[in-house]
Amino acid sequence: MVSAFETARTINTKYNCFLEVFEDGRYSPLPGKLNGMTVAIKDVLALKDARLTCGSKFLENFTSLYSATCVERLRLAGAVFIGKTNMDEFAMGSSNENSAYGAVLNPYDVTRVPGGSSGGSAVAAATGAARLALGTDTGGSIRQPAAFTGTVGLKPTYGRISRYGLTAFASSFDTVGTFSRTLEDAAIALEVMAGSDPHDATTATAAVEEYSLGLKKDIATLRIGIPKEYFGEGIEPDIREAVEAARKKFENAGCTIVPVSLPHSKYGIAVYYILTTAEASSNLARFDGIRYGKRSKDSETLLETYVRSRSEGFGPEVKRRIMLGTYVLSSGYYDAYYKRAQKVRRLIKEDFTKAFAECDALLTPTTPTTAFKLGDKVTDPLAMYLNDIFTVNANIAGVPAISIPIGLDRNGLPIGAQLITNDFEETNLFALAKEVITELRIEN
Ligand code: GLN
């Protein structure tokens, strides 16, 4: 019989979705609830004694001394770790083309991107190389690649899963979550990983629910909000139609459909790219060429070591974000950009609070387009950033959201719908997703 590891290796030769596939037996499973479920880990999450590159040359030879809390909880519950997955460098990107280790190809069409930044994890789950793949979502990095690869992508509430052992990008946005083919696997994994952690002070103490029970919950009493700002121009017609069909399914299931408005959503992209770059510029200051990772050779002074190590170790997108973030935090610009963006963040959060007084969940497209061509947006960062238009606001507000496959477009590419609920209402996400999901399976 072909082992799961061999299968993953074969799949990897086609799509470059793994940075490392482990040797069989390196991480043997314990008995437990997950019962040997195969799990791939985005290479921004620590696994003890495994390489942790964050998709960057800076950490090419870095090995982790400990495991992330989420990874450790999966291990203790009986997961089998298959390998570490490819990703955009430090989770910055929407196409996986910012990886220092080459792009990941979309299994539905290898001339297209799988989305990013968790593109490798998305493809690992889509192809069945792993039943579950861990991802991280700061502005859409689970939901957007899930939409592009026909997988279930769950971003739980901020603070629901510990960030301990996750290499920080933008700490007040970063969220650990999952890719899977089924809602059942996403629900059981959340049950295992969620909950407070003394190593992460931002973890929530709210009770961890039996999320899989959500899959049996009656949804007829739930109200679905349709936010008008998420159905404007620029959405591909096939996506619009598929989301409309999902809306009808909810109506047929007895849900009340409520038109709602999130008026500050239009500032989401601007707010996101000001606040996350500010946080990133501070978080990535630790990569200085001294403490860990790359140290540039032949530097004579301390300053030279910093400058050369960072110039050689980081790729162009990471440098762009550090410079943007440093700029918006600099004296003279702080009030105009950083402080103002913080105020608008508050307004966006209030929009969600108001909307959830009128409905239980929001239905939107996950992305305005299906998977785009490799190379299409690499020279136009703004066009790349705009692909996150429907996903960033959930991170700005901290609310949970899920992307689920709801069919294929005219080119045979997966379409994703997004559901968003109020904080800690993941059970409703699962209940509602069950009604409209079209489980997809790509053959290898
Ligand atoms: N695509 C977004 C970005 O480039 C989101 C990244 C993420 O969620 N990690 O920042």
Image (tube, grey):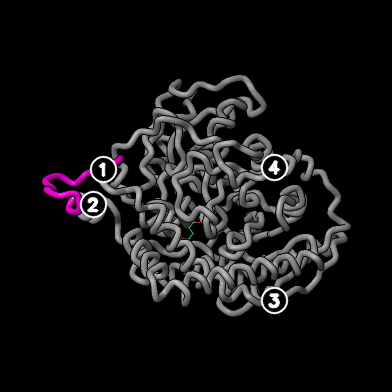
- Please report whichever mark, 4 or 2, sits nearer to the chain's N-terminal start: 4
Mark 1 residue type: Ile
Residue 292 is one of the magenta-drawn residues = yes
Q: Looking at the rendering, which quadrant does residue 407 occupy?
A: bottom right
Are circles 1 and 4 on residues that touch, CB within 8 Å? Answer: no
Q: Position of residue 52 (x, y in %)?
A: 38, 38
Q: Which residue is mark 2?
A: 306
Q: Which residues are magenta?
A: 291-304
Does residue 305 appear to the left or right of 71 in the view shown? Answer: left
Q: Which residue is mark 3?
A: 228
Distance between mark 1 and mark 4 Cα atoms? 37 Å
Are circles 1 and 2 on residues that touch, CB within 8 Å? Answer: yes
Q: Nearer the viewer, mark 3 or mark 1?
A: 1
User: Which of the two residues, 103 or 58, is positioned nearer the viewer here?
Assistant: 58
Q: Which residue is mark 1?
A: 290
User: Which of the two residues, 352 or 365, is positioned nearer the viewer here?
Assistant: 352
- Please report whichever mark, 1 or 2, sits nearer to the chain's N-terminal start: 1
| Residue 290 in view of the camera | yes
* Extreme-front residue of the structure: 331
Q: Residue at x 52, y 46 (%)?
A: 135
Q: Residues within 10 Å of mark 3 (few under 14, many from 20)?
A: few
For residue 205, which numbered disc appears in the image?
4
- Please report whichever mark, 1 or 4, sits nearer to the chain's N-terminal start: 4
Q: Main secondary structure of the magenta part?
A: loop
Distance between mark 1 and mark 2 Cα atoms? 8 Å
Label 1 C-beta lies within 8 Å of the nearest ligand 1 atom: no
Q: Looking at the rendering, which quadrant does residue 51 occupy?
A: top left
Q: Residue at x 11, y 46 (%)?
A: 298
Q: Residues within 10 Å of mark 4 (few under 14, many from 20)?
A: few
* Extreme-bottom residue of the structure: 233
Distance between mark 4 and mark 3 Cα atoms? 34 Å
Does residue 86 appear to the left or right of 31 in the view shown? Answer: left
